[in-house]
């Protein structure tokens, strides 16, 4: 389904401020739902004019708290998207959700509106860790939401955050064993990172928060991949694990550098070599849609070198790696002009990458140092 398009719908509103994002301005007590529904549909129509009629292979509702979107809004957006593009017969329609009892109570309505996959932000199976992460739910509420999700949706994923301060390897493996016992088809497992401008960054700068060092983080990473592989959910991307066939089709669109349309405040898109960015502040986006029929702030045509860089940065995250013929097509030059093959050979000799006539992949041994590998491999593409 290489010709399929993906659609990302960004719902920006949060119900509370979390400590590791900058969505303060997106907290709202009330939202004018009819106005927002109409604006999202207008934004969809603009994207459809730009992309032409291409089947949608996936739809993803993300952003602030999309599980609090009225099911009528979700249904209206999906109906319009299907009318504009058409749906693949096996379309994947995912919605991000917080694991609260309020949101879980709406899962049945969201499933009836057309959502067939949910990504649940559990984040930890430890109450102290959830308090540290600033989550409003506790473990009991989160697991109750997971149970409701598994009853309502065909496909369920949830995420956990590890490499938390003071987290021993043995404790994390016990938490993973518990997570695997719930039998979901997909798990997203992220190492805790500190983003600038967040509470965590302030705490770290003051010396009140220390994450595991490089060796400890690598041990956690390797043990995680080993445990998930043994359980039948191998890593198909650096942080994502799934039973074969249960990978997130929408996220694979990003990582395989295929086209996707993005609508809603702050949404990004890639279509036909053009990078789109919607206005980020909700009211500014809404005003732009009313004024222009869309919320686009920028639509920039990417150079071949920029496209190759993005394709490598995204694709080398995948266990399958990148198709070299496609990289050459995207970059409009022979592969030797886009990738430092001498450097690749040196990395291969170290067991960090593998290359043949068709594909370049990062090995299991290379994944813990993926960022360093990307700096070496992408350097020539940037200069091309």
Image (cartoon, rainbow, N blue to C red):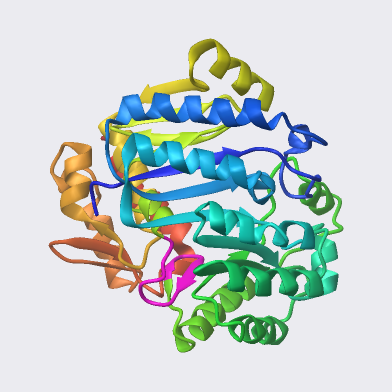
What residue appears at the point 33 percent right and 38 percent down from the top-left corner?
85
- Residue lying farthest to the top in this orientation: 291
Residue 45: image quadrant is top left
In the image, taking residue 250 as reference, residue 216 lies left or right, namely right
| Magenta region includes residue 285 | no
Name the residue nearer the viewer: 19 or 59.
59
Query: Could you say which is closer to the camera, residue 369 or residue 138?
Result: 138
Q: Position of residue 14 (x, y in %)?
A: 74, 43
Residue 263, given in percent of the width and then of the height, sits at 50, 33
Q: Going by the image, does 26 lie left or right of 151?
A: right
Q: What secondary structure characterizes most of the magenta part?
A: loop
The image quadrant of residue 329 is top left
Identified at 46% across, 79% down, the residue is 233
Q: Work out whether 307 lies above or below 291.
A: below
Q: Determine the residue positioned at 40% across, 74% down.
A: 364
Q: Quadrant of the C terminus?
A: top left
Q: Quadrant of the N terminus?
A: bottom left
Q: Would you say residue 265 is visible in this rendering?
A: no
Q: Examine the rendered structure and indicate whether residue 109 appears above or below residue 73.
A: below
Residue 107 position within the rendered picture, expressed as x and y whole percent measured from the top left: 64, 60
Examine the structure image and report whether residue 238 is included in the region drawn in magenta.
yes
Q: What range of the chain is rendered magenta?
A: 236-248
Residue 168 location (% of width, % of height)? 73, 81
Res 183 seen here = yes
Relative to 55, is 40 above or below?
above
| Whether residue 220 is situated above or below residue 384 in the rendered picture | below
Instruction: Quadrant for residue 306, please give it.
Output: top left
Q: Give the number of callouts.
A: 0
Between 193 and 205, the one nearer to me in the picture? 193
């Amino acid at each position: 389904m290489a010709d399929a398009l993906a659609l990302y719908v960004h719902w920006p509103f949060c119900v509370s401020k979390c400590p590791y994002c900058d969505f303060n301005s997106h907290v709202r007590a009330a939202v004018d739902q009819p106005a927002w529904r109409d604006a999202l549909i207008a934004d969809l129509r603009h994207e459809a004019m730009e992309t032409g009629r291409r089947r949608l292979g996936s739809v993803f509702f993300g952003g602030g708290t999309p599980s609090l979107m009225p099911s009528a809004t979700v249904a209206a957006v999906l109906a319009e998207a299907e009318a504009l593009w058409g749906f693949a017969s096996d379309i994947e329609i995912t919605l991000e959700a917080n694991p609260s009892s309020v949101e879980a109570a709406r899962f049945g309505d969201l499933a009836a509106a057309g959502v067939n996959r949910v990504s649940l932000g559990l984040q930890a199976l430890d109450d102290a860790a959830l308090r540290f992460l600033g989550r409003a739910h506790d473990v009991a509420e989160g697991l109750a939401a997971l149970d409701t999700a598994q009853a309502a949706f065909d496909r369920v994923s949830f995420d956990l955050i590890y490499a938390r301060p003071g987290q021993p390897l043995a404790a994390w493996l016990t938490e993973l064993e518990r997570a695997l016992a719930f039998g979901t088809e997909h798990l997203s497992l992220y190492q805790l990172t500190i983003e600038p401008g967040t509470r965590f960054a302030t705490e770290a700068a003051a010396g009140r928060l220390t994450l595991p060092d490089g060796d400890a983080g690598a041990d956690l990473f390797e043990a995680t991949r080993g445990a998930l592989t043994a359980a039948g959910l191998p890593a198909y991307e650096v942080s994502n694990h799934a039973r074969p066939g249960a990978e997130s089709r929408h996220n694979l669109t990003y990582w395989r550098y295929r086209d996707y349309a993005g609508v809603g405040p702050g949404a990004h898109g890639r279509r036909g070599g053009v990078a789109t960015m919607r206005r980020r502040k909700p009211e500014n986006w809404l005003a732009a849609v009313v004024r222009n029929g869309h919320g686009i702030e920028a639509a920039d045509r990417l150079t071949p070198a920029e496209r190759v860089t993005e394709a490598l940065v995204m694709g080398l995250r995948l266990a399958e790696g990148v198709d070299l013929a496609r990289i050459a097509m995207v970059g409009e030059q022979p592969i030797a002009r886009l990738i430092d093959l001498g450097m690749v050979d040196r990395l291969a000799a170290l067991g960090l990458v593998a290359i043949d006539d068709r594909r370049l992949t990062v090995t299991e041994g290379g994944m813990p140092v993926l960022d360093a590998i990307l700096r070496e491999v992408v350097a020539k593409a940037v200069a091309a």
